[in-house]
Structure formats: C-alpha cells, structure tokens
Image (tube, rainbow, N blue to C red):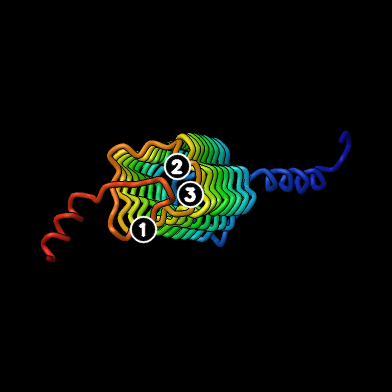
Amino acid sequence: MTGMPFRLILPAVIALLGAAFPAVAQGKPVAWQPGYVGSCGGCNLAGRNMSGWTLSGANYREANLEFAFMRGIQATSTNFEGANASGVDLRTALLTAARFSDAILTNARLMGVQASGAEFRKSILRGANMQGALMVGANFSDADLGETQLDEADLSGANLSGVKFDKAVMKATILNGANMTGVVMTGADVAGASFRDVRFIGADLSGMSHHDLANFDGACSSIDTLMPPGLLLPLCGDVIMASATAQ
C-alpha cells in the first residue's frame, strides 16, 4: 500500500471493521460473542453457531433457532417458549429450569443435556435424540416424544402426563416416580427401563415392546389402563378409594 493516498485507504479499513461487528436481528442487536443474556424474542438465528455461549436468563421466546449450533451452551432459566428449534444441536447444554413450552424441537440433538426442572409442556420433540439426558423433575405434559431416542436418559419424577411415546426407544431409561397419566406407548421399546413407583392412570401401554425386561416395581394403574399381554399392575391406592367411595 506504499504511496496509496489516505483517502483510498480509509474506506477499505471502515469496510473491514464493519464486517467484524454484530449484525442486527429484527431491529435488535445480537452480540456475536460467547454470551447474550438480553432479549432476542422473535430473532432469526437459524443456522447460527452459538456453541459455548452463556444465555442464562435470556429471552429467546418464539425465536427461529432451526439447525442452530448451540452445543454446550449455558442456558439456565432461559426462555425458549414457542421457539422453532427444529434440528437444533444442544448436545451437553445446561438447560436447568429453561422454558421450552410450545416449542418445536423435532429431530433436535439433546444428547447429554442437563435439563432438570425444565418446562417442555406441549412441545414437539418427535425424532429428537435425548440419549443420556438428565431431566429429573422436568415437565413434559402433553408433549410429543414420538420416535425419540431416550436410551439411558433420566426422567425421574418428571411430569409426563399425556405424553406420546409412540415408537420411542427407551432402553435403560430411568422414569422412577414419574407421572405417566394418559401416556401412549405404542411401539415403544422399554428394554431395561425403570418405571419404579410410576402412576399409569388411563395410560395405553398395550403396544410397547420388551416390557418383560423392564422394572415396574411399585408401579400402579387404573381400571382403564391398557396393558400388553403378560403385564399386570395393581390399581393405584387413590383409584381404589375413589372406586369404593363411588359405590
């Protein structure tokens, strides 16, 4: 650049600097750096690489996170309600108490996530891979977990009422003490799964496979629970009392 006039150098420098700074999503600045804890509701972040970012307490309500790379993020108590996160990569993410109600997480990669106490009410996780996920006490009521991979995941004490588990792979999944009222298990493979003290009120267990290899110690059912051949569960105590009172 020897001898080049200053008036020609300055525009080039400004252009380079501009390319290195943040973009703007729907009028709101999004910091392209390892962390953003502000409000980005409705942002279009499809395909963005946010791996390792700190997002705890942030608002990503109804954001477009399709196929975003969010592996290993710190997102405790973050709001993802109504987000479109189909195909998102959230492997090993910290999602404790995060909120995903009404979110779309089809085919999401959630292997090894820590999401105890998280909210997934009415979310769609069909085809998601949740192998080895820690989701103790999470709320999945009325969610769609059909065709999910749940091998060795821990959903102890979770609220799974009304959940669809059709064709889910639940080998060695831990569901001890979970509320599984009204679940549908058609085609679910439960080999090695643990259902200790689970309440299967009004559930459809008729189509699940390898139930003979699962642990149902302390589990109970209701008179309208549908069972597969060879599985007999006692009536839950409060169901017996309600039946006796009705008579």
> Depth check: 23 or 11 in front?
23
Q: Earlier in the sequence, mark 3 or mark 1?
A: 1
Q: Which residue is mark 2?
A: 211
Q: Which label belongs to residue 208?
A: 3
> Depth check: 117 or 31 in front?
117
Q: Which label belongs to residue 182?
A: 1
Disc 1 packing (10 Å; few <14; some 14–19; many ≥20): many
Asked which secondary structure carries label 2, the reply is helix
> Depth check: 73 or 135 in front?
135
Instruction: Find residue 226 and report its image quarter.
Output: bottom left
Residue 124 at x, y = what percent?
50, 57
Q: Nearer the viewer, mark 2 or mark 1?
A: 2
Q: Does the CB distance between marks 2 and 3 fall below 8 Å?
A: yes
Mark 2 residue type: His
> Depth check: 45 or 3 in front?
45
Q: Does the CB distance between marks 3 and 1 fall below 8 Å?
A: no
